[in-house]
Amino acid sequence: MVKAAIVILLASAVLVSSTVGAESDTPWSRDEGMRACLRNCSSRIEKAASPTKVQRGACNDRCTCIIDGMFEQGGKPKRDQSDLPKVAAECNTRLQQEAVAQREKVVPQPETAPAPVTKPGVVVGAELLPGTSCSKATIPSLQYDHGEHRIQIAGGGFKMRLPKGWSATLERPDLVVVSAAVGVEGVRPVFEMFVSPVCKTYDGLLVNRRVAARGLIELLPANATMDQVKQGSWTVGLGGPVGRNFVLSDVVLKTKKGERMVVLYSTQLADSKTFGLHAAAVCPRKGEGKGKLGACEKTYFKMLQEAEY
């Protein structure tokens, strides 16, 4: 390869017309060709503006493509000198196509449940939160954004980041289930986040029963857990640091591995004119003093407090 040929190669590589100093019939090696190409390309971008890492990277990509097209990795020529314009044109076309493809990459969209899906063992009815005198408006869908690890309403208006290390399952368009990585003696902390119609009154106990079944699914069939919660006499309370909470405290459930104590929350987080935002939680109760929040409960309310509306 002679310098005159390298001039053609460089001009095609950087899409500029250029000339190099004195020509010579002395063949150039692969390394010499690469250095000359980079030197020529760099001189062009430096004259145009202050070179950036992206521009220098483009020079390297173009020169590497052309030199690879003309030489073997060991340095032996694999194309005739007359093929230089063709190799340069092929490289330009390929690099341009790659650049366009990179720009057109679609940003992953938040996950949207296409159809109702129920967690094995936990039966979810058509109404997540039954009530009286309920609105008939269309309920918006929830989405789970994997990249941000958060729940949001399709179309905007509500975002809530989830606890680090917890998993999220979009069971159906109006329901996301958030689960801790590990449980406490078989009781796994679980939160629900869902949307439902705005009603005059609500049957919060159904939500408590359902989320309890999720938390004890490793110890009891879901129906058995729900029946025990329904039939038992528990301390019932209202309040909580976020939203309006219906609370069942110190719920003792009999399992195949002995009794387990939990606390259950059903939270009315916020209402619009047509739909409401609701949450629920099942948390193990072990060692906390009366009236004190355990680690699971603190995580639940911290998640709700940091929600954006």
Image (spheres, rainbow, N blue to C red):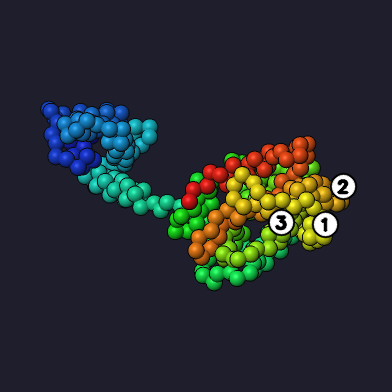
Residue 258 is labelled as: 2
Q: Nearer the viewer, residue 145 or 142?
A: 142
Disc 2 secondary structure class: strand
Q: Look at the numbered disc 1 and give the secondary structure of its residue.
A: loop
The answer to whether residue 90 is left or right of residue 233 is: left
Distance CA(mark 2)–CA(mark 1)? 17 Å
The residue positioned 68% from the left and 59% from the top of the image is: 204
- The answer to which of 156 and 166 lies nearer the viewer is 156
**From where the camera sits, is residue 221 visible?**
no
| Label total for image | 3
Q: Answer yes or no: do the residues labelled 3 and 2 have beta carbons within 8 Å?
A: no
Q: Mark 1 points at which residue?
A: 232
* Whether residue 116 is situated above or below residue 143 in the rendered picture: below
| Type of amino acid at the residue the image marks with label 3 | Asn
Residue at the image position 56 percent from the left and 44 percent from the top: 305
Give the foreground label among 2 and 1: 1
State which tag comes first along the sequence, 2 or 1.
Answer: 1
Q: If you read the primary sequence from the N terminus, does the residue marked by circle 3 or circle 2 appear first?
A: 3
Which percent across, then down, holds residue 65?
32, 40
Tag 3, which secondary structure?
A: helix
Give the residue displayed 58% in from the left and 69% down from the top: 134
Tell me the kind of residue under disc 2.
Gly
Residue that mark 3 sits on: 208
Give the x, y percent position of residue 30: 30, 31
